[in-house]
């Protein structure tokens, strides 16, 4: 199934794109998907430790066990800048 990532202006410097379509397996949890994002873009996790990033799926905050669905829009954004990159 297909989902689309949307990155804020800060994260666009790392990802090199504003949006990014992705094909994912059915019943994939958001936490598992987040691991794949951090694997693809290790600079995100290195520059923005826990608490520095925000996420929404279709405009709502994902829960601990949120499962991705066909057509989900996943927004990644910086909520607090890290001193590691300032």
Image (spheres, grey):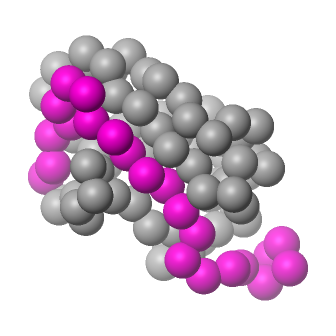
Q: Tell whether position 36 is magenta.
A: no
Q: Quadrant of the C terminus?
A: bottom right
Residue 60 is left or right of residue 51, and the answer is left
Residue 10 is left or right of residue 62, and the answer is right
In the picture shown, does residue 54 fall above or below 17?
Answer: below
In front of the other: 34 or 56: 56
Q: Residue at x 21, y 36 (%)?
A: 68
From the image, give the main secondary structure of the stretch colored magenta: loop
Q: Position of residue 3 (x, y in %)?
A: 34, 28
Residue 57 is left or right of residue 44, and the answer is left
- In this view of the protein, can residue 28 be seen by the observer? no
Q: Position of residue 59 (x, y in %)?
A: 28, 58
In front of the other: 51 or 70: 70
In front of the other: 75 or 28: 75
- In this view of the protein, can residue 11 be seen by the observer? yes
Q: Residue at x 60, y 82 (%)?
A: 80
Q: Quadrant of the N terminus?
A: top left
Q: Magenta residues, as a range? A: 65-86
Q: Residue at x 48, y 78 (%)?
A: 51
Q: Tell whether position 83 is magenta.
A: yes
- Which quarter of the picture shows residue 63? bottom left
In the picture shown, does residue 79 fall above or below 65?
Answer: below
Please give the count of numbered marks on the rendered protein.
0
Q: Position of residue 66 (x, y in %)?
A: 15, 49
- Which quarter of the picture shows residue 15? top right
Q: Residue at x 83, y 72 (%)?
A: 85
Residue 9 is left or right of residue 78, and the answer is right
Q: Position of residue 2 (x, y in %)?
A: 32, 19
In the picture shown, does residue 25 fall above or below 85?
Answer: above
């Amino acid at each position: 199934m297909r989902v689309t990532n949307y990155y804020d202006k800060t994260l666009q410097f790392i990802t090199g794109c504003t949006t990014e379509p992705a094909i994912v397996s059915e019943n994939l949890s958001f936490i598992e998907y987040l691991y794949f994002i951090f694997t693809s873009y290790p600079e995100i996790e290195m520059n923005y430790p826990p608490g520095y990033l925000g996420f929404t799926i279709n405009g709502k905050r994902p829960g601990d066990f949120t499962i991705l669905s066909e057509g989900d829009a996943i927004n990644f954004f910086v909520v607090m800048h890290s001193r590691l990159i300032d």
